[in-house]
């Protein structure tokens, strides 16, 4: 039961549309969101285009545009600032390919909380002249915002920051970093994969130059669809050298004698879209838009808090910061043996995941307070794994 009557009890409305709960207590949305019945049906919609029409290029391209429109609506930006990518990695790489590291301004300032893709992509640019600086965390969990700001200088080309850390759930306050970077003439790329769909995000007011993520997790979609937001005011001069025909100004010009990329953010796209993934991912994101991210944020905040209280009462160490501004949906619990711990919880019918020595418990709007009881009971039963 939701204690605060002003918070909409979302699980009581939507949970029955997620059949995974007939089988397990699913709290692994930081890895893959649960499958809604409507999302499942969308796979069939795609298959029926093959069965009925054979090749339905019109419908398929339409879905790419539908996806772009949904991202734009959800993140409160114009469609011209959205590239529909096949992964967050594809977006970051397209951005990196547009940067010139051969000039004096060749530094990349990043953190210790990044997903592997981010670190690896920037270090790959060392082959092109980049100098990569990782700002250490002062408490081993959160991004040290003051230290990041202090690291930004006139040689900094781009600041690359993860909004929500994939292994400990810490959420970084982005605004002061973006402001400082812009003061020094540096760009900012935000990896919002772990917060998109869990925390309200308005890219227009955030003013980051680039934001990447994908539909697989809290956006209720499937692998194969990502987004790259590129702020037109500050990035329209950047032309990717990693490209493909779907990034061309006129896709069907079929020109092999020149490079004429789209003016909009679409120039960061590449080849044929992951069409089978667009159908379910569009349906998932539409569902989230209909539910309302503010409702999700408030409801899941209560579930997160209840899990935290429950596991802390067992003596568990919750690594994720407590303050609401500094966490999203995920709660990271310190473990002595993360893989064995996940397996032991799975034996209790609780699906979680692990990274960096922590068990990641990641609820969404379909989880309820019965789940919380089951999760806490399973942590009690497996308490010998808790790193206290
Ligand atoms: C924070 C974060 N960034 C990036 C990724 C990778 O995204 P992709 O596989 O779409 O490149 C993940 C996936 O788990 C993630 O959690």
Image: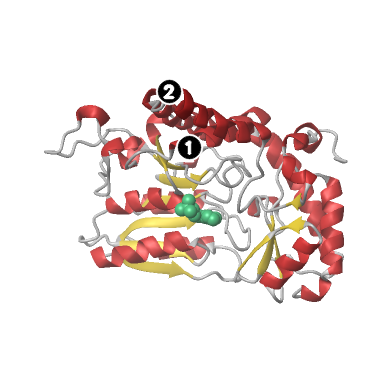
Q: Position of residue 294 (x, y in %)?
A: 67, 35
Q: Is residue 18 rendered to the left or right of residue 114?
A: right
Locate the N terminus and report the quarter of the image it occupies.
Answer: top right
Location of residue 268 by image quarter: top left
Across the whole image, how many numbered discs are drawn on residues? 2
Q: Ligand 1 near label 2 (Cβ, under 8 Å)?
A: no
Location of residue 133 by image quarter: bottom left
In front: label 1 or label 2: 2
Location of residue 167 by image quarter: bottom right
Disc 2 designates what residue?
53
Q: Nearer the viewer, residue 128 or 376?
A: 376
First in sequence: mark 1 or mark 2? 2
Tag 2: Cα neighbours inside 10 Å, few (<14), some, or many (≥20)? Answer: few
Q: Nearer the viewer, residue 386 or 47?
A: 47
Is label 1 in contact with label 2 (beta carbons under 8 Å)?
A: no
Q: Residue at x 67, y 70 (%)?
A: 339
Q: Residue at x 72, y 67 (%)?
A: 343
Locate the C terminus and report the quarter of the image it occupies.
Answer: bottom right
Q: Position of residue 59 (x, y in %)?
A: 43, 24
Query: Please, is residue 361 above or below residue 382 in the view?
Result: above
Can I make out residue 152 in this image?
no
Q: Position of residue 281 (x, y in %)?
A: 54, 37
Tag 1: Cα neighbours inside 10 Å, few (<14), some, or many (≥20)? Answer: many
Disc 1 designates what residue?
276
Q: Nearer the viewer, residue 153 or 324?
A: 324
């Amino acid at each position: 039961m939701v204690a605060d009557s002003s918070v909409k009890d979302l699980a009581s409305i939507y949970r029955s549309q997620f059949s995974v709960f007939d089988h397990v207590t699913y709290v692994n949305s930081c890895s893959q969101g649960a499958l809604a019945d409507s999302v499942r049906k969308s796979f069939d919609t795609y298959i029926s285009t093959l069965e009925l029409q054979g090749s339905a290029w019109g419908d398929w391209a339409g879905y790419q545009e539908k996806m772009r429109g949904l991202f734009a609506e959800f993140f409160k930006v114009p469609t011209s600032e959205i590239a529909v990518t096949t992964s967050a990695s594809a977006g970051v790489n397209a951005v990196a390919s547009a940067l010139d590291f051969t000039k004096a301004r060749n530094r990349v300032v990043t953190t210790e909380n990044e997903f592997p893709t981010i670190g690896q992509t920037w270090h790959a640019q060392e082959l092109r002249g980049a100098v990569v600086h990782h700002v250490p965390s002062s408490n081993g969990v959160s991004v040290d915002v003051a230290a990041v700001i202090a690291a930004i200088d006139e040689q900094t080309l781009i600041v690359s920051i993860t909004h929500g850390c994939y292994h400990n759930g810490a959420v970084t306050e982005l605004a002061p970093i973006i402001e400082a970077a812009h003061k020094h003439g540096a760009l900012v790329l935000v990896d919002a994969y772990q917060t998109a769909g869990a925390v309200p995000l308005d890219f227009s007011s955030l003013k980051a130059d680039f934001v990447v993520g994908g539909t697989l997790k809290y956006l209720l979609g499937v692998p194969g669809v990502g987004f790259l937001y590129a702020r037109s005011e500050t990035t329209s001069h950047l032309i990717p050298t990693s490209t493909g025909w779907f990034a061309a100004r006129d896709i069907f010009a079929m020109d092999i004698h020149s490079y004429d990329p789209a003016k909009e953010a679409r120039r960061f796209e590449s080849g044929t879209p992951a069409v089978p993934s667009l159908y379910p991912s569009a349906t998932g994101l539409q569902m989230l838009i209909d539910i309302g991210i503010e409702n999700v944020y408030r409801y899941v905040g209560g579930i997160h808090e209840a899990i935290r209280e429950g596991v802390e009462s067992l003596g568990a160490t919750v690594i994720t910061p407590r303050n609401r501004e500094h966490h999203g949906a995920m709660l990271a619990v310190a473990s002595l043996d993360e893989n064995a711990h996940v397996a032991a919880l799975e034996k209790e019918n609780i699906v979680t995941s692990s990274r960096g020595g922590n068990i990641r418990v990641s609820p969404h709007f379909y989880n309820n307070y019965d789940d919380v009881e089951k999760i806490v009971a399973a942590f009690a039963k497996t308490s010998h794994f808790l790193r206290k």
